[in-house]
Image: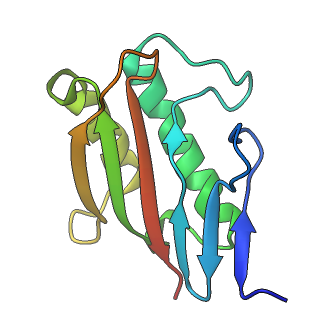
Amino acid sequence: MSKRQSVNFPGFSHSNPIPNASRIGNIMMSSVISGRDPETNDLPADMADQIVNIFIHLRSAVTAAGGTPDDIIKVDFFMKDPVSGRAALNGEWEKMFPDAESRPARHTQHLAGDGASHVSCNFTAVFT
């Protein structure tokens, strides 16, 4: 039996043969997570709605692996327009991680391309 475990959760999947995340021991790393609606799989046109969905997926991913958002240690965001999306991103960030003394590291980079996705992310969690 492999010590690596694929982690998948309802409401999100990839079209390629990859899991939503992978876990070895107490460390989990996600694949790219988009802002698709977890109920309909549709991609909202609005960046703020995509951001809300990403945080739903973040919680679902870490919960599926047996953890909580407190186990997330770093999140990398990719945004088409980081400046205009910062308020929406920060709002959801503070909802999920309300304690300013206990937040994951975060890095935001430019999302290239002309597709409908305004934002995506990946994350690392360490389960204690």
Residue 85 to residue 128: above or below: above
Residue 107 to residue 127: above or below: above
Q: Position of residue 7 (x, y in %)?
A: 71, 64
Residue for point 74% across, 27% down: 39
Which quarter of the picture shows residue 117? top left
For the N terminus, the image quarter is bottom right
Residue for point 38% across, 20% down: 47
Residue 65 to residue 24: above or below: above
Residue extending farthest top: 45
Q: Position of residue 68 (x, y in %)?
A: 56, 67
Between 19 and 56, the one nearer to me in the picture: 19
Q: Position of residue 118 (x, y in %)?
A: 38, 23
Q: How many marks?
A: 0
Q: Is residue 14 left or right of residue 118?
A: right
Between 78 and 37, the one nearer to me in the picture: 78
Which quarter of the picture shows residue 65? bottom right
Residue for point 50% across, 39% down: 54
Task: Identify the image's colour scheme: rainbow, by chain, secondary structure or one colour.
Answer: rainbow
Residue extending farthest right: 1
Residue for point 57% across, 53% down: 59
Q: Is residue 84 left or right of residue 121?
A: left
Q: Position of residue 104 (x, y in %)?
A: 31, 65
Q: Is residue 108 left or right of residue 75?
A: left
Residue 74 to residue 61: above or below: below
